[in-house]
Amino acid sequence: MTSKPNALDASAAQADAAERPLSILVFGAHPDDCDLRFGGAAMLYRRLGHNVRFVSMTNGDTGHFSMGGGPLARRRYAEAQASAAIADIRYDVLDIHNGELEPNVATRKLVIQIMREVKADLVLCHRPYDYHPDHRAVGVLVQDAAYTVTVPNVAPLSEPLLRPPVVGYLFDGFLDPTPYVATVAIDTDEVMERKIDMVHCHASQMYEWLPYNGGVLDEVPESDAERRAMTARNMWTRFGHTADAARETLVRCYGAERGAQVKTAETIMISQYGRGLREEDWPRYFPFFPPPRRSA
Ligand SMILES: [Zn+2]
């Protein structure tokens, strides 16, 4: 099989995107989850002319040790907007308290309305198996909305989608009750430095809360340049592990030569509870891979 995309493929993909842009909706629990797990792929889609929207289902207002409430929520909102500007995407942050996201009917309707508003083709979220209750709730909410988004009398004042979107899960390393298996793996090497810039925007998390929570706050450097360098090291390592975990999928998506060389990746595990991904959907949904693309 061919292992390298050529210029014709790229221009054909751009022409297709101009005619029929995909609507990609990424639901994270907190205002940094989407960036970490799909920031690179979001930029690759945007470059081709597709639409990407990130939604943080909570406002992140408990994610700190010395700040909280409104000031923290507003700080994290600003961080998310700075990150979104780098990727040229819209980033919505819902005003639901961090740690209090519940997979109830009212919130499901919110998710349905967002899916309908953007006419989502591809919806990504956490799995319902995850360490954080908000992450788990996002997985359940999206799963519960994936079919009901097509039912006119569910939230009857918004226009239903005619068919369920393709639903996929963002990468995680959890094994219980079932391990994550990447269906799709996207090479993020060429946008990795820009993704690091996105993650660097989340200063309240990267340089304050997460190091505090991990007991390494005293290891965080003072200067902006040193902090970014620390994030860069961490990101290349972390998403290098993601690439290694998904190596077989990378080889299947890009061919043996490039698949073996990819250093960093973002992945999607297609959910059984969305529309499913047909073989013929691959070129449109994942315009990064050289033909022939193989799903399994
Ligand atoms: Zn989170």
Image: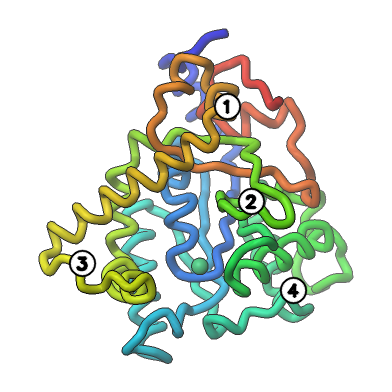
CA–CA distance between discs 4 and 2?
20 Å
Cβ–Cβ below 8 Å for labels 1 and 4? no
CA–CA distance between discs 3 and 4?
43 Å
Residue 248 circle label: 1
Classed neighbour count for the residue bearing mark 4: other residues with Cα under 10 Å, few (<14), some (14–19), many (≥20): some
Identify the image quadrant of residue 31: bottom left
Query: In the rendered image, which residue does mark 3 sit on?
Result: 219
Residue 109 circle label: 4
Q: Kindly identify the amino acid type of the residue bearing the numbered disc 3.
A: Glu
Q: Could you tell which of marks 1 and 3 lies nearer the N-terminus?
A: 3
Instruction: Quarter of the image for the N terminus: give it.
Output: top right
Q: Please state the horizontal and vertical placement of residue 85, each as a whole percent of the image.
A: 34, 58
- Residue at (59% x, 67% y) in the render: 131
Q: Please state the horizontal and vertical placement of residue 104, each as a whole percent of the image.
A: 76, 79
Cβ–Cβ below 8 Å for labels 2 and 1? no
Q: Please state the horizontal and vertical placement of residue 181, each as a whole percent of the image.
A: 65, 41
Q: Nearer the viewer, mark 2 or mark 1?
A: 1
